[in-house]
Structures are given as structure tokens and as C-alpha cells.
Image: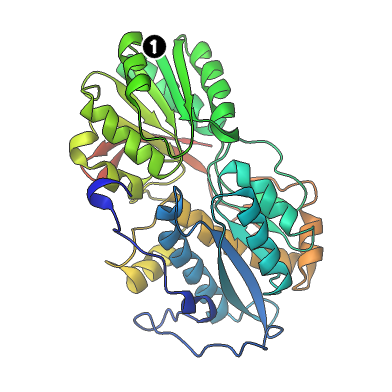
Amino acid sequence: MPGDAAGFYTSLPAEWASRHISLRGPCETGAVRPAGSLKDAMRIGVILSHGGLAGLWTPGCQGAASIAAAEINEAGGVLGQDVQIVHRDSGETVASARSAAEHLLLEERVDAVIGLQASHLRSAVRDGLHGLAPYVYTPHFEGGFCGPGVAALGVTDHEVLSPAIHWLAEHRGARRVFFIGNDYIWPRVAYGTTESVVRRSGGRMIGHALIPLHQRDYDAVLEGVKAARPDLVVIALLGEDAIAFNRAFAEAGLSGAVLRLTLAFEETQLLGVAPGNAENLFAVASYFNGTQDHDRETLLEGYGHAFSGRLPDVTTNSLNCYDAIHLVAGLARHVGHVDGHLMARVLRQGLPRSLAYKIMGRSVIGARVALAEADGTEFRVCENWKS
């Protein structure tokens, strides 16, 4: 993470992949399973980037996944089997992401995989599973069918952009809009969605820029923003790229006059931006810390008990990883077997999110989208809508 947030969080220790967390005591761990005892548990692979641009989300996602597994195990497991989490680093390339999936399938013999990957790595994970295990894809994404065997839990660009841009136009006078994103699948689609929503809200797109991943020289882009004089800049940058750009944006003197709406951006990143660079910074997501009525009290209580002060607070990304573990357990119960191939077949045409929540036992949950404004190192919710 750039600046004073560097090294703020580290991944969970590797040995936690094969241990249990008890919800009854202060982060107690049980015995490590013998290496050859793979058939005694339902094994779920958790593929996350352990470094690079998306690595800052990994510790919280690992922690939330472990809480979900502990809840399931203390309730009797899945069809008589305990859930065991197996962590694997996806890396940042198509080759490394596919290799991680194949390792989990062939060497670790997992029954399912959950993962938070950039959209250009999603198909690599899916293909690496060869249709033999389901893949629950957790992050905010561009929308659409993610391929056979995949269930997507994250909100889509249209779900968040439509209400947020209309609200910013009505309440903050945001009519002239500039778009900045990385140059890969998600931001390219997000630009088109932004353009359509802005037009329907009575505004006008006045410029856009797509920049490579890891780029840190923003001078030309920021000069373009200054010249265009937008009311609002919509930002679709991945992980630490979003932190670095938002800091540069404020340091260029733009934050006082130009609103920013950041996509796939949450509290962990806001810590990296720092309060002095967060003026007029908005984010839109399905969950912000402190949001009520998400039916996740056990997650918040168990996570806080186990990890308070050592891992980031629960965010939209970690909440989705928690839900993903429960969805995998629900899929096994749905097909009546802990069998990756059978579970993947259920997802051959995808899975509507409403049905995913029903399978995981949360049929009455109301999916919400919230718009929030940065207030120091926290987000203050301005408005929320039914998704």
C-alpha cells in the first residue's frame, strides 16, 4: 500500500489454512489435520492475491472465510463433514491464476473454490478448475455471465452507478463527468455503463482515460482533468492503484473543487488515501462498516472477537467471501453430496444472486446499495437503495 499505509496489514499465517477457529473462545485453534486426511473434510480453496494491487484485501477476506467455516463446523458441518479452508495465491497473471486453481483441484483436492480476482483473471481460475469444482466469484464486477460453473456474488457497475450518479447530479450538481480507469475488462465496461447512466441523468461525459495497471505517473491524466473542468470524476482503478491515484488527485489541488466517485473501493483503501486527501471522495458499495440490516451479526461478532486490532474491519469484500463459504456449503446440501462436479453442474448457466442467497439460507435478505462520503478514515452513508 502506498505511503503511510505501507505494510499495515499482512496475510493470515499460512498454517491457518488447515486449522479451525472456535467461536466459543478467544481465537482458539484446533489440531492440524494430517496431510493424508483429505476425505474427512469438505475442502474449499480460497484464491486471493497475496501481494500486488489486490493484496490489501486478502487478510480481511481470509479472516471472514475462516469465521464462516467455524460457524458451519460448530453447527455440525456439511453433510457430516467439517469445512476446511485451503489458501492459495493467485498472483497477478493469467498463468499464475490458472496454476493456482489447478493446484487446488489436483493437488489439494478441493471441492470448491472462492476467489476475489480482477476480471481479466476470472476466466483463468474458472478454466483451471475444468468444470470439476464450482467457483464463487466475490468482488464488484462489470456484470454479465461469468461462464459455466461460476456464481458471482458481487454487485455490478449498473447496480451502483445508476443510483449514485443520479444522487450526485441531484444533490451535488454533478453534470460534467470524467472517467478514469485501468485498461482491462472491468473498467472498459464500466466506462460504457457510466456514459449511459450520465446521459440518462441529464449530464454529459467530457473525457476519459484508461491507464495501465501499476502506473504511477498521473501527470498527463491530471492535466487532462484540469483542462476538462468536470464536476465529477468516476474512478475504476484496481486496489492500490486507486489509493495512489486518489492521493495524487488531492496533491494536484483538485479535491476541493471536483467530486470523486470511486468504484470497488472500501475502508481498507480509504486508510491508504489518508484523511487529508479524501475531501469530496465518495464510494458506492453493497456494504460499509456499520451498515445495518445485512443479517451478518454472527460474522461481525465472531470476526471482531477473533481479529479485532489485527485485521481490517469487515468490508464489502470480506463480507462477500464470508457469504461465498456459506454458499458453497449450501450448494453441497442442495445436491445432497460434497461433490465438486455436481455442484459445478448446478452453476452451468450461472446463478442469480437472489437464488444464491436462498441456497445459503438467507432468502429474506434485502440486497442494498449505499453511497457514502469519506469522513476522515471512515465512510459516512449518504443514501441507500434496494439493489
Question: Is 32 on the left or on the right of 230, as rendered?
Answer: right
In the image: residue 186, left or right of residue 214: right
Question: Looking at the picture, does residue 283 appear above or below residue 86?
Answer: above
Residue holding disc 1: 175
Circle 1 — which element? loop
Is residue 369 visible in the rendered structure shown here? yes
The residue shown at (79%, 63%) is 132
- Which residue: 39% across, 63% down? 300
Q: How many marks?
A: 1
Residue 304 sits above or below residue 174 on the image: below
**In the displayed structure image, the side of residue 26 where residue 387 appears, left or right:** right
**Which residue is at 32% across, 16% downward?**
223
Q: Would you identify the image quadrant in which residue 280 lies? A: top left
Name the amino acid type tagged 1.
Arg
Choose between 86 and 176: the one closer to the eye. 86
Point out residue 195 in the picture as x, y percentages from the top left corner: 53, 17
Q: Position of residue 51 (x, y in %)?
A: 45, 56
Query: Residue 197's x, y, as percent?
Result: 52, 19
User: Quick one: quadrant of the C terminus?
Assistant: top right
The picture quadrant where one finds residue 346 is bottom right
For the point 57% across and 21% down, the residue is 192
